[in-house]
Amino acid sequence: MAFNIEPFVWFLIVFTGILVVRWIIIGTMKRWSKGSDSRTRVFYMGKAIVNWLTIYGTLIYILFYFRSAVWMLSPLFTIGSEPVSVFLILIAVLIILLTSRISSLVRRYIFPGVYKRYELDQGVQFTFDKAFHYIIMVLAVVVSLSTVGFELSALTVFAGVVGVGIGFGMQNIASNFISGIILLFERPIKVGDRVIVNDIIGDVQRINMRATVIKTLDNEHIIVPNSYFLEEHVINRSYSDKVMRLVMPVGVAYGSDVELVRQLLLQVAEDEAAVSPTVQSKPEPFVYFKEFGDSSLNFELFVWISDPTHVIRLRSALNFRIDAIFRENQVEIPFPQRDLHVRSVDASITEQWNKS
């Protein structure tokens, strides 16, 4: 039997035409977008859409082009009374991939403009992105299951089986999954918050469905299970109000003029506020005479700051200022000292010791 090459020739012609159309569209959009930032953003969005349509459009064309092929329509297995073929499986996969791509495009190119218009913070943006993606993907899975003939009523049996599995071997996974949903909507922590976990300071970068990623001040990443934030004690420096009190302990030598010390510390806070907008003038800085220590008179300077992410920088700057102003005014910062008293020894005892 002679091999019929004509269908493949027509397929190659159509495929080549698709590539040519893609090249013309992208080239036209690129020339149109030059000289404008807003048009450039539209170009990248349009380019992504065109590339996606080219790839998936070609796959869909292949599916329908070979739809009469025996291998494409032959049933592989049955679900209930519905036969499932390669064609139906590919359609279901394309639905899920299409939905995922649409979700990505909406979250990347449409939502940012909405967030900017309504001035939503980073945590709210992250919550909306995740919620939108999960909802649209669940719908895609439901539609794809219906496409291959899966009866949705059977999900009740499936849910029962999954429930038994969760009860015996997936408690931690299920707990972290549910905790992740609670974190996204109740928002005890959110993306961008500065938190302290086990005495480690870091910023929340991502809240995934199982774990939360925290970036420390040393540029290290900590993966914390979501359930931890609902079960353990966590300090959130950014929760509701970012303004926090910075405490600067300092000790001076006994005999120092404590009133002068108070004035100098307040001057330090005032000088730093003049160059750093993070330091707040209200509430006013306060000097706390804490105690009479073993080797020093201990004070604490209370300064209010508006952004907890600047704690380390401001603490260092204030310490530099305190050291400089104390040197200028001859205020001594002591170090721990111990006096050693040597008791005189009786001469007779010394003589007996030497003879021995």
Image (cartoon, rainbow, N blue to C red):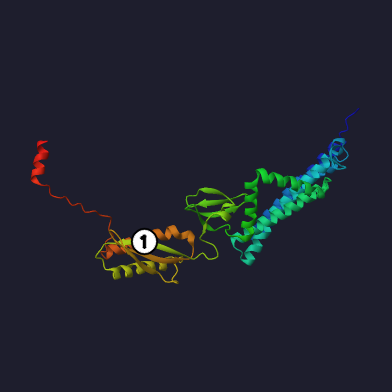
> Residue drawn 44% across and 67% down?
304
Query: From the image, which quarter does the N terminus lie in?
Result: top right
Picture coordinates of residue 300, whole percent (x, y): 37, 64
Element type at mark 1: strand
The image shows residue 115, relative to residue 282, as above or below, that is above
| Nearer to us in this view, 121 or 28 | 121
> Residue drawn 76% across and 53% down?
139
The image shows residue 120, relative to residue 104, as above or below, that is below
Rendered image quadrant of residue 314: bottom left
Q: Residues within 10 Å of mark 1 (few under 14, many from 20)?
A: some
Would you say 78 lies left or right of 295 here? right
Query: From the image, which quarter does the C terminus lie in?
Result: top left
| Nearer to us in this view, 325 or 341 | 341
Picture coordinates of residue 76, whole percent (x, y): 83, 37
Residue 270 appears in the picture as rendered: no
Q: Amino acid at mark 1?
A: Pro
Count up the numbered dots. Answer: 1
Picture coordinates of residue 240, whole percent (x, y): 55, 65
> Residue drawn 62% across and 47% down?
172
Residue 307 appears in the picture as rendered: yes
Rendered image quadrant of residue 84: top right
Q: Which residue does the numbered mark 1 point to in the structure image?
A: 249
Picture coordinates of residue 17, whole percent (x, y): 79, 45
Q: Residue furthest right?
A: 1
| Nearer to us in this view, 22 or 102 | 102
> Residue drawn 68% across and 46% down?
167
Would you say 253 lies left or right of 133 here? left
